[in-house]
Amino acid sequence: MDSTTVILYFDGAQCEGKLATHEKRQNARKTAINAADDHVTTFMDRVSEGAHIRKRHFTNVDKQLTNAFRWDVEARNGLVRFLENHGWRVVQCDTEADVKIATDTMEGDIVISGDSDLLIYHSIPVVWRPVCGGGFLEYRKKDMLSALGLETAEQLTVLGVVSTNDYNRSLYVLGCETNYEIVKDMKAKGSDDQAKDVPALMKEYLADERVVIKNKSGITFDTSINVFVHLHQTPIAHGQHDKPDTTALEARLEGIKERYQYARSKFTERKQAQLASRQATKRYRTIDRPPPKDSKDSTTTPPPRPRYSFKTRTKTVTHEPPQAMKRYKWKPWTELPESPLEKVENKLTPKKPAKKPAKKPAKKPVKKPSKPPTPIESMDKRQLWNGLKWEHPKATLRIGTIQANIRAALKTRADVADEMIDCLREAVGEANRTKRRAQRLIALYVESMAAGYMQPKDRDYLDGLCPRVELKDADGGQDSSENHTDDDIDGEPDSSSSQFLYAFLRHLYSGNPPTNRGVGKLVTGFIGRLQELNLYTPPRLTSAIR
């Protein structure tokens, strides 16, 4: 960083709108101090008792002391004076530094902060958030608006005002996701094609039916509007905050730190004493060789001095065998065998395998007669439908193709059979033409997306055409046929993608618009998107023709 281009902002006094947040942080600090006190007491007891100290005993204390840390005003003012003496430009704010930063920020400036609330201010275009390793994450407001699908920066400000922040909480049951849907549905521009200001959008938000039902107490978010829109904060009057309570916490925290340092010093002394005792009990010492003596003949190396050890070696001692071994005595052979290897050879000679009895030929299992197929005349509508689902009709109809089946069933009425065959051919042809038309429209739509005409709403349409691949959907390289279910074979719709395609095909066939709910609403938007791209013109409705 360069001191000539960087301006450092420091917080000032507390403001009235943030009293609830300061009280919450003060309670969390009290909890951390109580936990640190308990962990330090446990640490001291284990040190005094000589118990083993593990890593978690240190991390428990260090974590709670870190949570209880607070940068007091004296230390902050000392850092400000130090930076000013070394040529840095420092701004000491009256209240929160966020408001002063939003006031001074100009076009092209970059704000470095870990506070995400800065993006709510209208005048801040870019925020860099520090991360581990000395790097930064860049957040540009234009890119965020494009990713969220919002038209103006005022909508983002309204979303930050009505959501939970340091100055107010969101309405009950209306979380960030619900508020985002409400703000996104609002019209960001007026009749003159100018962006609406924040007060007008807030009025529209409070008039929404979903907000009116939950806003029983009539909350208007005035505090957040004063801060994020009007850039105004009111400092706390002198003596209003609890100064004695803060002083007592600081004194208690210092006492805990002193106890912890004392316990760590005792632990270090105990470790050093243990190390010294282990070194004192070593029986052997390394004996260094003496330096070589000066001799006239430098080519000869003096013999090494014999090494000695403090250990005394005893002579080999013969022990009397135990009582259990005295029960066994060695006896000589009563009669020597002819050859010492006789028994060994007998053991090594493999025995001939015994003949197994011949197995009797197994009787062939008698096949039970299979259940005869149900005749077509006695089938109901469901059985006929299941039979026609199979790829080959012979599985149910037992004879050739559909044309042959019709002619075989209507031998005496050839005219009716020809009419039925023509009807089926016409239905198949119409289905084929509808499918080809849908394929061409989808292909043209995908090519338009690849050409750079993609908008945020197109992601929903692409998800309807083809669902996204997730990690749990991967089969690990195994045969995909093992994962097929009966639903896949039957061809029944088992996903929103299939329902989307079926609704689109029904529209192309009949010309009627889809229903305005569920997947039908998404298909209606997709048809409108095709019209915007000049790829498709829907047929006129019957009502329009009349």
Image (tube, rainbow, N blue to C red):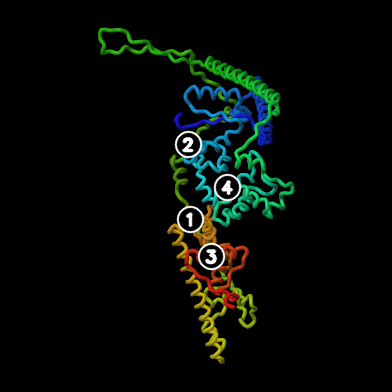
* Position of residue 9 measured from the top left corner of the image (x, y, whole percent): 54, 31
Label of residue 289 in the image: none
Viewer-closest of 145 and 444: 145
Q: Earlier in the sequence, mark 4 or mark 2?
A: 2
Label 2 crowd bin: few (<14), some (14–19), many (20+), radius 10 Å: few
Residue 542 in which image quadrant: bottom right
* Position of residue 543 measured from the top left corner of the image (x, y, whole percent): 60, 75
Q: Is residue 43 above or below residue 512?
A: above
Query: Residue drawn 46% across and 46% down?
Result: 346
Query: Residue drawn 58% across and 55% down?
Result: 190
* Residue to which mark 2 is pinned: 135
Label 4 crowd bin: few (<14), some (14–19), many (20+), radius 10 Å: many
Query: Residue drawn 32% across and 8% down?
Result: 293
Query: Which kind of residue does numbered mark 3 sit on?
Result: Gly
Residue 46 in view here: no
Front position among marks 1 and 3: 3
* Residue to which mark 3 is pinned: 528
Viewer-closest of 84 and 145: 84
Label of residue 477 in the image: 1
Query: Which kind of residue does numbered mark 2 sit on?
Result: Gly
Query: Which kind of residue does numbered mark 1 sit on?
Result: Gly
Q: Earlier in the sequence, mark 1 or mark 3?
A: 1
Label of residue 156 in the image: 4
Alpha-carbon span between mark 4 and mark 2: 26 Å
